[in-house]
Image: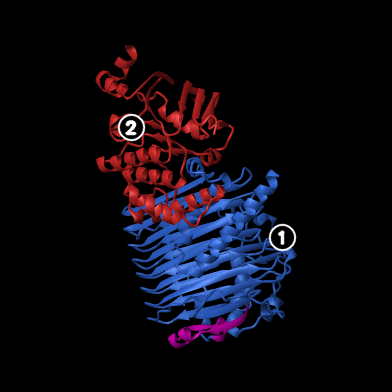
Chain colours: A red, B blue
């Protein structure tokens, strides 16, 4: 396939009339792990919501292509069908709706087999350490923070996306859950060539998930890009120190 | 003012209806009182937002003769009802009592068959609440009585089908007495042909000490039917009275529920799901009256409104001075699916005792944007995501119905409405 990558070019995004992203550029190839770090309010979550097309996040300029296809003209569900997955920082509780019905409808819309969904769910749940009894719960209802993130990772596995945006998947996780989730995502990058855009505050996610590129997002744009060594510098110098040097 | 527009409702018709002398006296008294009853007006709070002003009573006459052509009613959904009763146009056209109810000694008959039948009128609520209640007393042709004797437990539901197939005004009446420490479930299915019809049903239920009673109404009336329904329940000491309503059909369908918790420790639940489409109006008024101490009431009404349909929920929870340690909850949630759809929600509390825990909540909003986004971000197409959320929204009510067959009926009706909506959306986008 030509142009096999998720390309973000000069992305400008406004929320409630206020410009949050002021020209973000990035290219994520299959199997690569890109990590976006940045201080609070730098626009990290805005980037993830805008990529998936949340109605409150208005793209005012720039373009995004997924394997050569324009993404921004598509409704959210078609972005997902084209291979984009968003792992939300705070997964939404949807009363009365089961995980199985959501994954079944997603598979149906893709023209895929729906009979195997249940089996896939159980397999992924086992791999990720998500208790099978939680599969019967309405989506995310009464799940702890850690369980919600395991659930998101399970969905990523069943849906089989090509690019995953992980919005602070490490927040609210205990050590065991973090290890399970980050290991699973690392496996996806190697086994299924998943491209990852991981947004995080913390370096501990990167103890298992091996980053190829680190981007520092500040005031709505990428102000520094480097290899894994940036994380260490960041730990020592902080955002301000890093960006001042 | 009197009701000079009731010329079609003559004393001759009232007197011609079947029944013993005592029943004729009840009808006659109600007829006389009609002259003193104020005509309903949307200026009154209880009729506010209603469409009662559009109803022209002067064009109506009551259904005064037993229907000749009996409609066939498929009842195979209920695998083993303890009894089946059919009311057509307010007349009792069939009573089938099964073995279980027979052995338990249940009374199911026209109330006129009982010598002491008069005592059942007003047993739950002393007087009719409006003109439709008086008309029901004066022109109800064959009120039905169900008595569940003391200590009897009925496993299977009593199924009552109330069918309307006439242009004339129809007055079905069902009275249930659940005696001390008995237990029963009743399913009431309301249907009508696709003709202009006006129905004023009355349900009176008295739940005796420590008795457990559930009543499920599936209102699936024809698209041109107007209904003014009144349900009254009196819950005795330590009793449980549960009402479930599925509001599906009708052009204008009003249900007023008066629930009085008269015995100490009584518990009541009223749950309703309603789904308006086209230009339907669903009108619900509830009164939970905590008369005694240690009483609990729980109310949950959930509705979805599509196209240019409308709904009204107006509820009053009243805590009387003697009702210490009352707990009351009243919740109404509405999802407005289209710009022209409209929902009014007015929960009220009137508290005359300090030692109570009461809450009320109401919402009218579109489908939650974040829920929709979340499902879409998994690859679920927008209309499918909306359907899943709506089915999930109603699930809380559907799963609360105590009879599986009724839950199934409600689920199928919701799916049917969602299918029509999907079809309309597809046609609209072509």
Q: Residues within 10 Å of mark 1 (few under 14, many from 20)?
A: few
Q: Examine the rendered structure and indicate whether residue B386 appears above or below residue A84.
A: below
Residue A96 seen anywhere in this rendered image of the structure: no
> Which residue does the image show at 67% across and 55% down from the upper left?
B53
Q: Which residue is mark 1?
A: B56
> Which residue does the image show at 32% across and 40% down from the upper left?
A183
Please provide the residue range marked out in magenta. B91-113
Q: Chain of mark 2?
A: A
Q: Residues within 10 Å of mark 2 (few under 14, many from 20)?
A: some
Residue B3 rendering spot, x and y as whole percentages: 68, 63
Q: Is residue B104 magenta?
A: yes
The outermost residue toward the top is A245
B262 displayed left or right of A240: right
Residue A77 rendering spot, x and y as whole percentages: 54, 41
Residue A193 rendering spot, x and y as whole percentages: 43, 37
B296 displayed left or right of A116: left
């Amino acid at each position: 396939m030509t142009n096999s990558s998720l390309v973000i070019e000069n992305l400008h995004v406004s929320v409630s009339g206020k410009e949050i992203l002021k020209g973000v550029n990035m290219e994520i190839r299959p199997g690569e792990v890109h990590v976006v770090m940045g201080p609070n309010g730098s626009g990290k979550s805005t980037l993830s919501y805008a990529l998936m097309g949340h109605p409150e996040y208005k793209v005012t300029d720039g373009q995004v292509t997924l394997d050569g296809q324009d993404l921004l003209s598509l409704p959210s569900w078609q972005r997902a069908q084209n291979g984009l997955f968003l792992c939300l920082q705070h997964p939404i509780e949807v009363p009365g709706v089961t995980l199985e019905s959501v994954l079944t409808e997603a598979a149906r819309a893709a023209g895929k087999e729906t009979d195997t969904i249940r089996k896939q769910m159980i397999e992924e749940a086992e791999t990720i350490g998500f208790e099978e009894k939680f599969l019967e719960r309405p989506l995310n209802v009464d799940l702890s923070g850690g369980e919600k993130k395991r659930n998101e990772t399970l969905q990523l596995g069943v849906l089989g996306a090509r690019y995953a945006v992980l919005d602070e998947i490490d927040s609210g996780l205990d050590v065991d859950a973090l290890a399970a989730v980050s290991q699973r995502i690392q496996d996806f990058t190697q086994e299924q060539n998943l491209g990852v855009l991981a947004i995080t505050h913390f370096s501990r996610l990167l103890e298992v998930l091996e980053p190829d590129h680190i981007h520092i997002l500040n005031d709505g744009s990428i102000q520094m890009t480097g290899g894994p060594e940036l994380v260490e510098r960041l730990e020592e110098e902080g955002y301000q120190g890093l960006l001042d040097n | 003012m009197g009701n000079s527009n009731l010329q079609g409702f003559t004393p001759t018709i009232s007197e011609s209806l079947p029944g013993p002398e005592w029943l004729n006296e009840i009808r006659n008294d109600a007829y006389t009182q009609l002259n003193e009853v104020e005509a309903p007006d949307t200026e009154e709070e209880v009729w506010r937002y209603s469409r009662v002003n559009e109803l022209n009573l002067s064009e109506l006459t009551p259904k005064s003769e037993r229907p000749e052509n009996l409609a066939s009613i498929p009842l195979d959904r209920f695998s083993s009802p303890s009894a089946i009763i059919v009311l057509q146009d307010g007349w009792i056209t069939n009573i089938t009592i099964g073995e279980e109810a027979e052995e338990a000694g249940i009374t199911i008959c026209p109330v006129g068959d009982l010598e002491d039948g008069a005592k059942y009128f007003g047993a739950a609520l002393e007087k009719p609440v409006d003109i439709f209640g008086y008309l029901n007393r004066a022109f109800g042709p064959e009120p039905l009585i169900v008595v569940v004797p003391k200590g009897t437990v009925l496993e299977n539901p009593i199924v009552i089908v109330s069918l309307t197939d006439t242009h004339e005004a129809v007055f079905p009446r069902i009275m249930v007495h659940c005696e001390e420490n008995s237990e029963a479930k009743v399913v009431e299915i309301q249907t009508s042909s696709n003709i202009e019809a006006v129905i004023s049903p009355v349900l009176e239920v008295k739940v005796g000490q420590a008795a457990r009673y559930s009543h499920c109404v599936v209102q699936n009336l024809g698209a041109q039917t107007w209904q003014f329904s009144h349900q009254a329940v009196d819950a005795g000491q330590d009793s449980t009275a549960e009402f479930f309503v599925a509001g599906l059909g009708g052009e204008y369908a009003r249900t007023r529920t008066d629930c009085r918790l008269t015995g100490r420790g009584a518990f009541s639940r009223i749950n309703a799901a309603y789904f308006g489409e086209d230009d339907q109006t669903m009108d619900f008024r509830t009164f939970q009256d905590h008369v005694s101490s240690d009483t609990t009431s729980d109310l949950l009404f959930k509705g979805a409104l599509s196209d240019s349909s409308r709904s009204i929920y107006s509820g009053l929870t009243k805590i009387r001075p003697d009702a210490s340690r009352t707990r009351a909850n009243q919740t109404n949630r509405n999802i407005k699916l289209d710009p022209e759809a409209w929902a009014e929600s007015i929960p009220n509390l009137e508290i005359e005792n300090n030692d109570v825990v009461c809450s009320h909540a109401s919402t009218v909003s579109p489908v939650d944007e974040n829920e929709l986004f979340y499902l879409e971000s998994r690859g679920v197409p927008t209309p499918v995501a909306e359907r899943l959320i709506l089915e999930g929204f109603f699930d809380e009510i559907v799963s609360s119905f105590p009879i599986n067959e009724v839950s199934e009926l409600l689920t199928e009706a919701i799916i049917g409405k969602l299918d029509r909506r999907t079809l309309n959306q597809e046609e609209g986008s072509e």
